[in-house]
Image (cartoon, helix red, strand yellow):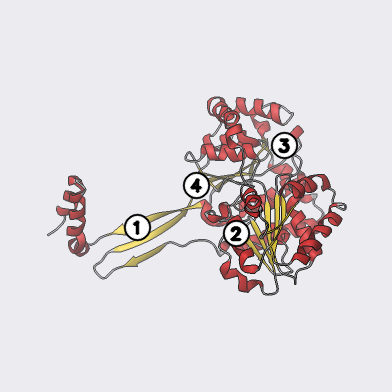
Amino acid sequence: MIFVKSTDNDFNEKFDELLSRGKMDIAHVSGIVGKIIDEIKNDGNNALKEHISKFDNWTPSSDEDLKISTASMSKAYDNLDEKLKSSLHLAYDRIKVYHEKQKPKSWFDTEANGTILGQKVTPVDSAGLYIPGGKAAYPSSLLMNVIPAQVAGVEKIIVCTPTPDNEPNELLLAACHLCGVREVYKVGGASAIAAMAYGTQTIPKVDVITGPGNIFVATAKKMVFGEVNIDMIAGPSEIGVLADDSANANHLAIDLLSQAEHDEMASSILITPSQALGDAVKIEIEAWLLKLPRQEIARKSIEERGAIIVTKDMDEALKLMNSIAPEHLEVATMSPFELLPFIKHAGAIFLGHNTPEAIGDYVAGPNHTLPTGGTAKFYSPLGVENFMKKSSIISFSANAINEIGEACALIANTEGLTAHEQSVLVRLK
């Protein structure tokens, strides 16, 4: 774990290494992913079955075998522990209420001369949601992707998730039933992205693809963008923590490890003006690591991509954190809301000592599909607008076009577009 002070002679060099944390070697896998995409485009389901056999260790016996039955989803839901079922319902309700407040509205504005301008907001017809599977399955990711699509009004929602050894995750199936998802396909990786982007004999082509995944999924999403829309190119998970000496070192340590346990490439960064807090957190991290079932993963992440930075003051800490633009940002200070106006870049901001990042992953309500690797400088969290598009509305009366048409025609003439010019002039008195 890097432990540095902003006054160290080599600080800038070490900080630049942290800023490059989100780089993924997309170029290295783009050839492999491009081949997978081409095979799906050219050979549809046959290519899908070959990829599943190769990557997921089972071979579908028919096209129908690619799809998970609604009966198995219903059964998985019925078999859920009642407390877990209640927890999922709580999460569903809170996420839905939050996202309903995001829904943009159509609007119209009428000017005195009869001009009507406005914006019509409509959902896309179809959305494809990618939910990781394999060693771990994330029903929370399903909720976070399905609910904003439903709130947007998307008519056709499909889900693709890998099922190694043809063993779908029962909790994920239960979450699908809870959300009312009817089409779930046992397809993962770049193959799933290609299938949803171009369509196969079984999997329909969609308009938008969302959801997290590994480097192959991220690369595939980047390569099919333009054929379909996508949410973002997400990399490994990360957390940044701004803290002063009012923070609890034990709490901060486990908060940092909550991201480190995701995978070895995750990054966890604490920035504080308190040397004593930094020292205490480092000790607490080691104590917590010994208790974690995923210790090996978390330890490698913390050792290779973790950092504690001690700054001169909180102003410098804020400046550094804005440069990092973390996916998740905890503000563990005496007066966190006083710092909020100075935070410019973060996927999600968690304010106060009682707001761990994990609460946002599951039941708070805001979406946990967030920009990583510094892309919070220009990307937003997944939301309802990812599943909607806008159309401009324009209607001119005779008075209106006579009032401003001459100016329009002059600009068109200046650009040398005579037909544009004349299409306006023929309507003027």
- Mark 2 and mark 3 in contact (Cβ < 8 Å)? no
Where residue 346 is drawn, which disc sits there? 2
Quadrant of the drawing holding the C terminus: bottom left
- Mark nearer the N terminus (1 vs 4): 4
**How far is the residue under mark 3 from the one under mark 4?**
27 Å
- Mark 1 and mark 3 in contact (Cβ < 8 Å)? no
x 86%, y 56%: residue = 287
Q: Which residue is mark 1?
A: 393
For discs 2 and 4, the disc positioned in front in the rendered view? 2
Q: Position of residue 105 (x, y in %)?
A: 46, 62
User: Which amino acid lies under the numbered mark 1 shown in the image of this protein?
Assistant: Ile
- Mark nearer the N terminus (3 vs 4): 4
User: Which amino acid lies under the numbered mark 3 shown in the image of this protein?
Assistant: Thr
**How far is the residue under mark 1 from the one under mark 4?**
20 Å
The image quarter in which residue 25 lies: top right
For discs 3 and 2, the disc positioned in front in the rendered view? 2
Q: Which residue is mark 4?
A: 125
Q: Position of residue 21 (x, y in %)?
A: 64, 47
**How far is the residue under mark 3 from the one under mark 2?**
33 Å
Classify residue 159 as left or right of residue 58. left
**How far is the residue under mark 2 from the one under mark 1?**
34 Å
**How far is the residue under mark 2 from the one under mark 4?**
31 Å
- Mark nearer the N terminus (2 vs 1): 2
- Mark nearer the N terminus (2 vs 4): 4
User: Which amino acid lies under the numbered mark 4 shown in the image of this protein?
Assistant: Asp
x 68%, y 48%: residue = 176
Badge 4: few (under 14), some or many (20 or more) residues near its Cα, within 10 Å?
some
The image quarter in which residue 258 lies: bottom right
User: Which amino acid lies under the numbered mark 2 shown in the image of this protein?
Assistant: Ala
Q: Which residue is mark 3?
A: 163
